C-alpha cells in the first residue's frame, strides 16, 4: 500500500519549483572566432540620362561599408560565443568580444527549422546562420554568417545594396 501523502506529480512539481534557481546546462557549445570578414555587394542605381555613376565611387562606398561592418563587429578574432543549452533550443549566452575584454551575458535561441541562431545581449539581437567552411589541409570548421543587408540598404538608398554579410570563422570543427 502506498503511504505517500502527496501524489507523485505534486511532489515532482514541488521539487521543480524548489530547484528552479539551479539550472545546469545539459549541453554547452563554444565557438572561438579565428577571423572575421565582411563582404558588401553593391550596384549603381539606374542613371538619369547623361548622369553615369562613377565606378570608383561605388568601390569607395563598398570599402567603407566593409570597414564599418568590421569596426561594429561585436566579436573579434580571439573572442567567441558560449551557448549553454538549458532548454531544447535555448539558454544563456556568453559573448567574449576579444581577449582581455569583459564578457557580455545574454540569451540565445536556435531555430528548429534551419541551422540558425538569434543572439540577444545588451542592446543587440543578432541572427546568424551556421554553416561550415574548409581551409586548405584542415578539417571543416563552423562558420557564423550574419546578414546585415537590410541595415545597409536603409543607410545607403543612393545605391542598390545587393548584400552585406559579416562572416565569423571559428576554430571549432563543424559537426
Image (tube, rainbow, N blue to C red):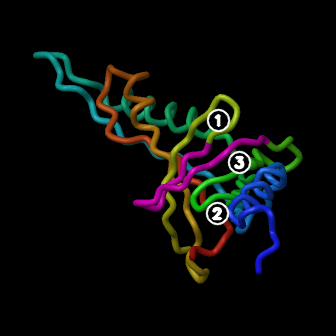
Front one among 140 and 18: 18
- Mark pair 1, 3: CA separation: 9 Å
> Which stretch is magenta?
104-119
Q: Which residue is mark 2?
A: 170
Give the crowd class for mark 1: few <14, some 14-19, many >=20 residues within 10 Å: few
Residue 74 picture location, percent across and down? 67, 40
- Mark pair 2, 1: CA separation: 18 Å
Instruction: Work out whether mark 1 precedes mark 3 in sequence or the reverse, and give the earlier one.
Output: 1
Instruction: Work out whether mark 2 precedes mark 1 in sequence or the reverse, and give the earlier one.
Output: 1
Q: Which residue is mark 3?
A: 76
Of the numbered discs in the image, which one, if any, rests on residue 116? Answer: none
Dot 3: what SS? loop
Which image quadrant is residue 151 in? top left
**Going 62% across and 52% down the picture, which residue do you hit?**
36
Q: Is residue 54 above or below residue 79?
A: above
Dot 2: what SS? strand
Front one among 62 and 173: 173
Residue 10 visible (yes or no): yes
Of the numbered discs in the image, which one, if any, rests on residue 71? Answer: 1
**Magenta stretch contains residue 109:** yes
Residue 99 picture location, percent across and down? 84, 50
Amino acid at each position: 500500500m502506498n503511504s505517500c501523502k502527496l501524489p507523485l506529480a505534486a511532489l515532482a512539481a514541488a521539487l521543480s519549483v524548489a530547484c528552479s534557481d539551479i539550472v545546469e546546462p545539459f549541453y554547452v557549445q563554444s565557438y572561438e572566432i579565428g577571423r572575421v570578414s565582411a563582404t558588401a555587394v553593391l550596384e549603381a542605381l539606374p542613371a538619369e540620362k547623361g548622369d553615369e555613376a562613377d565606378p570608383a565611387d561605388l568601390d569607395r562606398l563598398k570599402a567603407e561599408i566593409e570597414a564599418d561592418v568590421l569596426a561594429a563587429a561585436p566579436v573579434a578574432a580571439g573572442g567567441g560565443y558560449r551557448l549553454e543549452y538549458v532548454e531544447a533550443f535555448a539558454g544563456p549566452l556568453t559573448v567574449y568580444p576579444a581577449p582581455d575584454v569583459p564578457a557580455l551575458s545574454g540569451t540565445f535561441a536556435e531555430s528548429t527549422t534551419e541551422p540558425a541562431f538569434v543572439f540577444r545581449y545588451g542592446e543587440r539581437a543578432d541572427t546568424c546562420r551556421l554553416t561550415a567552411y574548409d581551409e586548405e589541409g584542415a578539417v571543416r570548421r563552423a562558420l557564423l554568417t550574419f546578414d546585415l543587408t537590410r541595415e545597409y540598404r536603409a543607410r545607403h538608398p543612393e545605391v542598390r545594396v545587393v548584400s552585406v554579410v559579416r562572416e565569423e570563422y571559428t576554430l571549432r570543427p563543424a559537426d
